[in-house]
Image: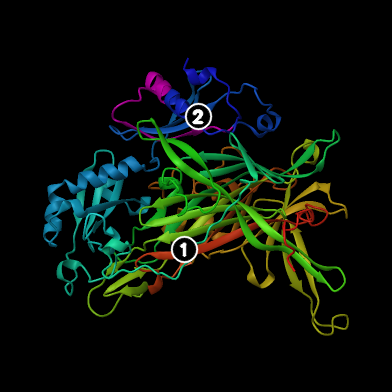
Amino acid sequence: MTDAATTSTAHPLDPLSAEEFRATTAILRRDKGFGPGWRVASVELREPSKDLVRGFEPGQDIAREARVVLWDRADGTAYKGVVSITEDRVLSWEAVPGHQPNATTDEWHDCDHAMREHPSVAAALASRGVTDMSLVLIDLWTYGGFLVPEQYRGRRVGWCDVWVRDAPTSNPYAHPVSGLKLIVDMNTMELLEIEDPGAPASLPNGFAPVDGEYAPEHIAGYAARTDRTLLEITQPDGVSFQLRGNELRWQRWRLRLGFNYREGLVLHRVGYEDGVDEGGRPRVRSIADRLSFAEMVVPYRDPTPNHVRRTAYDIGEWGLGFMTRSLELGCDCLGEIVYVDATLHDTAGEPREIPQAICLHEEDAAVLWKHVDERAGAQVRRMRRLVVSFHVTVANYEYLVYWRFYEDGNIECEVRATGIMVTTPYDGDTPPPYGTVVDHQTYAPIHQHFIVARLDLAIDADGDPDTAGNTVVMSETQRLPTDSGNPYGLALTQANVPLRTESEGRQDYEWSTQRSWKVTNPGRTNKVGGPVAYKLVPGAAVPPMFDPDSPVLARARVLEHAVWVTPYDAEERWPCGEFVNQSTVDEGLPAWTSADRSIEDTDVVLWYTFGIHHVPRMEEWPVMPADTVSFWLKPAGFFDQNPALDVAPTPGKACH
């Protein structure tokens, strides 16, 4: 038995440690023949049941299990299973023919290296005037199954863009080799095919004369602004949150940090301290069992040969955890910072550390509440928020994810997209109509970023199981007709419609009625007799704009609705299916909800699709200012009054 199997973990939701990754790999090597010629796609904690987590006491021994996906490159067969680290054995194991596991960063680097050394690639580039292969970047993309060429069906294949730098550290994405595509067997790194229609006739060697550099050393005549004075954020007494292992406490908030290869940051057991229990101990009321991002779909809305294959599943195909970057003080995070490291693995199953993967800090956020009375004077409270963040690099794009917790019980989820847009030179004077011209004979295609948040809410769900169930209520404002009782047309009322089945739980955003969704607990009431609730306040809801018969949409039917509601099932984790690499149909939410199960007074999960409808601007070239989108979870009858009444006034000099 391995050392990891004999130790107690601090908490059942703690991510796998380096020792546990090694133990899992050792078990697979011994019992399943894992070794050279295989790749590990994923190893992650198999999270224990909610009942076990809720009943866990510190020091208690628990079973530690890992979910695994790997494949044999020799025949392409993929397998998934569950490994008991505690019992030192494989609990389940099955082949999954017809499915391709997620791509890995090792494959991306291996492909880049192999193709830059391939003589046929060198010859194709030499015909464009490119002879220094050290300046070439091969950017590997995965396929939608319907686009895999017929002769390569059944193989693990990828297609590649080719880019060229002006200098060793200059921007590779400034100079695409237009039209040149490579098709590669990702198991053997064999070059299967080169697509090369030749350079646009009006451009020498196919490269447009663009101003595509953003790093100061590569910008001629660069001079940094001198009109910015120093801004420092200090907390002389230190931070006011505590991190004990993976448990985070800040004022009245309680939650746990998790991390895995696919979702990256996961927030567990989110609760708010509100009053005391019968024993006089602080009472923590549950709000969510688990909050994360479950999928990200990025279709480029350009049907030309350069872009028709370009639809990325950044979570299901590549994994936010794998692409997480270390954060830097003063650049990514400002103030008094606490960092949390993350441990993942490579394709050999060996642990890989990501130092400073998660950033924890507090921010001032302007006024929390205020009132000025002519007799009593002004009462003002400053708002403070706790921010839990991580950043990922997906080739040319960056995604910055922030979960923000406020003193009044609000939770905000914000995503910032930055990085470098994909651009393409065009021939002649007329650009394709599918994007925006951002530089000389260069356009950036219209594209969309759809993010699916998996919101496993648990509103006051701890304690008596008979009163732990939740029901989602669609809430929207209705305008009443003008009549004798409403002569000026002022009347508005709020309609609240309980969603009872999964078919009713497929919901769309409606701007004209300001639709939102409340997750209520009918078994727990507030002081006026209403069910306690939290409200999903939608933001950045993006319409899919696909033909219903589009094969692109067939892989991501989740995009057809802003909200889906399902009863909790531990195996229902990925809205477009577990295996989206080379998929042709959505095996996730559409398949699960076809049973039309009850979602009333039970443990429910909300799936919220939001994102960015990106029509490029010239001001976003050569590097994008961050584009920001967000949604909120807000208490709606969860508290009996403003929970931030007891926030202390600003110390020292009075505000007025």
Alpha-carbon neighbours of circle 2 within 10 Å: few (<14), some, or many (≥20)?
many
The picture quadrant where one finds residue 266 is: top right
Does residue 97 appear left or right of residue 452 in this picture? left
Please state which of residues 234 and 112 is positioned toward the viewer in this rendering. 234
Which quarter of the figure has residue 352? top left
Residue drawn 45% across the image and 32% down it: 68
Q: Earlier in the sequence, mark 2 or mark 1?
A: 2
Left or right of 457 on screen, residue 30: left
Which residue: 45% across, 63% down? Answer: 448
Q: Position of residue 122 (x, y in %)?
A: 14, 52
Please tell me which residue is depicted at 42% across the width and 35% down the height of the picture.
96
The disc label shown at residue 261, or none: none
Point out residue 646 in the picture as x, y percentages from the top left corner. 79, 53
For the residue labelled by badge 1, is the local secondary structure a helix, a strand or a loop? strand
**Taking 395 as reference, is 448 above or below it?**
below
Residue 594 in sight in this render: no
Residue 121 counted in the magenta span: no
Which residue is under mark 2? 66
Point out the stretch of residues depicted in magenta: 25-47
Query: Which residue type does callout 1 highlight?
Result: Ala
Q: Nearer the viewer, residue 558 or 537?
A: 537
Visible in this render: residue 414?
yes
Where is residue 359? Give x, y as percent: 52, 47
Whole-percent x and y of residue 103?
37, 43
For residue 304, above or below residue 45: below
> What quarter of the picture does the C terminus occupy?
bottom right
Residue pointed to by mark 1: 626
Q: Is residue 232 above or below residue 69?
A: below
